[in-house]
Amino acid sequence: MTENAEVSPKHPRAESIRIRERLTRRVDGGVVSLAGLIAHGRGEAFDYILGERTTPSAAHAIRAAAGALLIAERPVLSVNGNVAALCSRELVELAGVTGAKLEVNLYHRLPGRDSAIEKLLRDEGVKELLGVGEAASAQIEEVNSDRRRVDPRGILIADTVFVPLEDGDRTEALRRMGKTVIAVDLNPLSRTAQLASITIVDNVVRAMPLLISEAKRLKGHGIEELQREVSSFNNARVLSDAMRTMEERLRELSRRGVYIGPRGNE
Ligand code: PTJ
């Protein structure tokens, strides 16, 4: 059994511990893989350096991502174990606002994981869910993991795919297939971050609610305006901004020798 402790609201890092517990509590049922816990730890480390807040350049990427989802003809939100555990409600809401389909797509497709994730999403009210069981019957040959198994009604024919917390292989393959790929990744150096069309360098827990409100706000805007916003987006610049923020913060923190987070010294 995975153990979960009471988190005191007075703990200076209560929010971070609560997020961890949302993941660890989902290991036993198979939603989150053990590799998912490692991936989260890596993300946390980058989040410390970033300052645990949404930077202006991440907000810019979120705006472009919302626009790209709204102008897409066949958008799909790809769901893995970590995002199901952390943001299933937000995924269902984002799908509703943008008209995107939801598809379960797993790096480790162990027996029962897809249906455990399905249950979480059904509990949040999702009606149509792709990629569960035999429905993941198509293959993207270039992908060297279970992620190659996709739904022929979803990722295979999508023009835009949202891939929060992804590994580089599939991002590369999807780009080669001519799709727009939107990633959320706290590590601006990862292959996914580098290869995606739009990379949101932010914690998925902070980015999802912002993405939903941007999509709601932009929904009333004209398609040409959205297309202009998306086509003028420069992903290399956003990645440079994220690295510069980290560099400047580390320089400042190393001068003081203390950690300063969004709520001050912790
Ligand atoms: O559920 P599965 O089987 O599909 O597997 C999911 C994981 C995440 C294990 C799988 O996609 C994987 O192995 O991913 P990687 O290659 O470890 O990459 C995950 C990336 O997400 C890393 O660059 C982390 O820095 C980043 N990351 C982790 N947690 C967060 C994050 N980015 C944003 N928000 C987070 N909370």
Image (cartoon, rainbow, N blue to C red):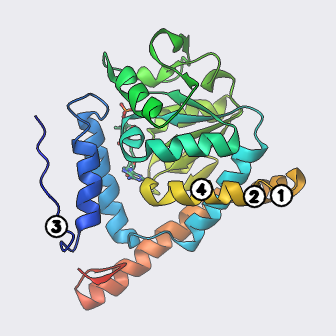
Q: Amino acid at mark 1?
A: His
Tell me how far mark 3 sits from mark 4, CA to CA. 30 Å
Residue 216 in the image, given as x and y percentages of width and height: 69, 55
> Which quadrant: the C terminus?
bottom left
Tell me how far mark 3 sits from mark 1, CA to CA. 44 Å
Q: Secondary structure at mark 3?
A: loop
Tell me how far mark 1 sits from mark 2, CA to CA. 5 Å
Tell me which residue sits at (44%, 49%) in the image. 190
Sequence order check, earlier mark of 3 and 2: 3
Sequence order check, earlier mark of 4 and 2: 4
Query: Badge 2, how many Cα within 10 Å: few under 14, some, many 20+?
Result: some
> Where is mark 2, residue-wise?
218
> Which quadrant: the N terminus?
top left
Q: Secondary structure at mark 1?
A: loop
Q: Can residue 106 be spotted in the picture?
A: no
Q: Secondary structure at mark 4?
A: helix
Badge nearest the viewer, 3 or 4: 3
> Where is mark 1, residue-wise?
221
- Cβ–Cβ below 8 Å for labels 1 and 2? yes
Sequence order check, earlier mark of 3 and 4: 3
> Where is mark 4, residue-wise?
211
**Viewer-proximal residue among 239 and 158:** 158
Sequence order check, earlier mark of 3 and 1: 3
Tell me how far mark 1 sits from mark 4, CA to CA. 15 Å
- 169 relative to 261, above or below: above
